[in-house]
Amino acid sequence: MAPPRRNLLPKERFAFAFGSLKTQSYHDPIARTPGSHTIRTIAWNPTGQLIATGSADRTLRIWNPERAQVKYSTDLRGHTAGIEKVLFNPARDSELASCSTDGTVRFWDVRSKTCVSRLDVGGEAFTLSWSADGSTMVVGRKDDTLIPISVESPSTPTMLTDGVQPPKPTSSQTTYKILESHPQPIQTNATTFSHHIATPTSPDLHLFATTGEGTVKILDYPSFNIQHTLNAHTSACLSIALAPTGRYLAIGGSDALVSLWDTTDWICRRTVSSNNGGAVRGVSWSFDGRFICGACDEVGCGGNGIEIFHAETGESVYTVPTGGGVNSGIPAVAWHPSRYWLAYSTTADGPGGGSGASGLKIVGAAGGNL
């Protein structure tokens, strides 16, 4: 059951309240040497009771944020190369997807700790997006090809036939099917779906895709026809996230900027930029759609902490002290789905970084008043 949503923090009180939270560190014993276990991707499940991490060393782990010891976590094994992206199904709390440069996408049931499907997508996979109802996924390959996957779960119970009760549906009876791939004419870096759920009267979805040309394409799904193009940045657009409220689309670029686009008229309302500079390889919204921060894995981006911005004004409201040295980076950030908790990972700061320097950290999980 999801924890109750907290009272919304006004901008003026954010720094005081968020700054009082304590940070919990999660150490993976696999991380024996500095830099060997860089966590590239972080994802919360829909209720915020679990958090998944995927690493360059193929480690895929599910953590209980309330219990930091590794014995309470789950190690999911199967990928044979670094994990590029993990993402929980927004409609099924225990279903996780992961993709890797080993050319596969895997679907996991985190309750049974098993891989329920392994799909070969024909090339190095590095991005994933679920539709809001969990029935569709789009995978991005490094050769700029987008591959849709249909996810069909058992629906209504089957009626009795000749007095025989049919078998009860289980999570493993979900079918995963690769659909026709869609090569893109330009470098395509990240995707995300709109929050719309398809209905008989409004069946099409929108898929947003960032490009190396500094644009974001708004595509119709399933046709992949371009509906609109946002000329967002002067250099490559790398990351993208739609606010939980649907009000703003945040786009992170290699120019160290995050641009915020009003989804009602597709006008860029403002840009924000961290003092750390560096390419913005991840963006994440707080559950209320009011605060945003970015990730940068470049050397030097993590030394001064993670800067949090107020979306409506663009003001910098707080900087999370990450404890990283001047050479550290922040590969991934992810806000909790219903609390003002912030998960992030850091890269080790050179030979003296310590074995835990590249682990998961969660602001708020160790205590505080949020």
Image (cartoon, grey):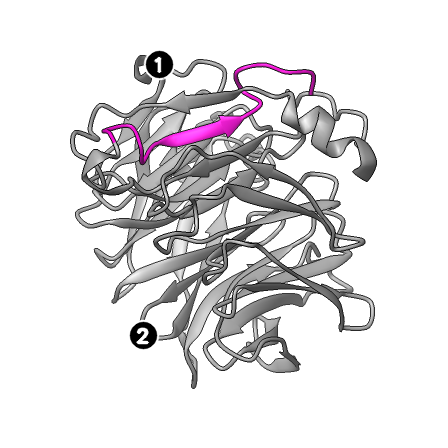
The quarter of the picture where the C terminus appears is top right
Amino acid type for the residue under numbered disc 2: Asp
Secondary structure beneath label 2: loop
Q: Where 243 sits versus 94, above or below?
A: below
Where residue 5 sits: x, y (%)? 75, 26
Residue sitting at the far front: 326
Residue bearing mark 2: 143
Magenta region: 354-370
Label 2 CA crowd tier, 10 Å (few <14, some 14–19, many 20+): some
Q: Is residue 238 visible?
A: yes
The quarter of the picture where the N terminus appears is top right
Amino acid type for the residue under numbered disc 1: Gln
Where residue 265 sits: x, y (%)? 82, 72
| In-image side of 119 versus 21 (left or right) | left
Q: Where 259 sits versus 108, above or below?
A: below
Residue bearing mark 1: 69
In primary-sequence order, the first of circles 1 and 2 is 1
Q: Residue at x 37, y 56 (%)?
A: 298
Per the picture, the main secondary structure of the magenta-coloured stretch is loop
Q: Is residue 166 visible?
A: no
Comparing labels 1 and 2, the label whose residue is closer to the camera: 1
